[in-house]
Amino acid sequence: QVQLVESGGGLVQPGGSLRLSCAASGSIFSINAMGWYRQAPGKQRELVAGLTSGGSTNYADSVKGRFTISRDNAKNTVYLQMNSLKPEDTAVYYCQATERFTRRSYWGQGTQVAVSS
């Protein structure tokens, strides 16, 4: 079992920045990849950024050049640095982890990000 706890959401003006954190606990040795997803009202959940255990990253086209996913292995924490935020980035952001062999997904509870003037 893996537990994920997100933090760092909030209200920010357009052009501003936020950093989301996702602290993992439990059977973290079984995690192969982690990612950040978001879901805006009335829309499907979408992948924002992913990070494999080997360090490879991928990003949604809409956030490339603005968002950066990273990790601190010592803290078992994954981050999402979000710069140049736009109103369309408003959503609930979820941390996700994929188990290495079973491919099971674990999800955090979500953290709200609102971009508005």
Image (cartoon, helix red, strand yellow):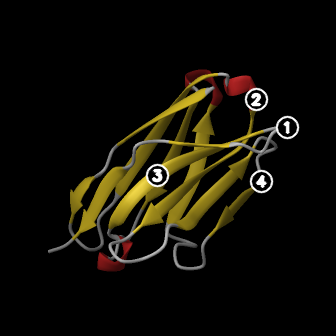
Q: In the image, what residue type sits under mark 1?
A: Phe
- Per the model, the C-alpha gap separating discs 3 and 2 is 19 Å
The kind of secondary structure element at disc 4 is: loop
Viewer-side residue, 104 vs 12: 104
Q: Residue at x 53, y 79 (%)?
A: 62
Q: Position of residue 69 (x, y in %)?
A: 58, 52
* Image height of 26 relative to 78, above or below: above
Q: Position of residue 91 (x, y in %)?
A: 35, 66
- Is tag 4's residue or tag 2's residue first in the polypeptide sequence? 2
Q: Amino acid at mark 3?
A: Tyr
Q: CA distance from mark 3 to mark 1?
A: 22 Å
Which residue position is annotated with label 3? 94
Residue visible at 67% across and 26% down?
A: 28
For discs 1 and 4, the disc positioned in front in the rendered view: 1
Q: Are marks 2 and 1 in contact (CB under 8 Å)?
A: yes
In the image, residue 53 lies at what x, y percent?
77, 41
Disc 2 target residue? 30
Q: Are marks 4 and 3 in contact (CB under 8 Å)?
A: no
Dot 4 amino acid type: Ser
Q: Which of pointers 3 and 2 lies earlier in the amino acid sequence?
A: 2
Whole-angstrom CA distance, mark 4 to mark 2, is 17 Å
Q: Which residue is mark 1?
A: 101
**What crowding class fits label 2: few (fewer than 14 Cα within 10 Å), some (14-19), or many (20 or more)?**
some
Query: Rounded to the nearest whole Å, what is the CA distance between mark 2 and mark 1?
Result: 8 Å
- Residues at discs 4 and 2 in contact (Cβ within 8 Å): no
Q: Earlier in the sequence, mark 3 or mark 1?
A: 3
Residue underneath mark 4: 56
Q: How many marks?
A: 4
- Residue lying furthest right in this view? 101
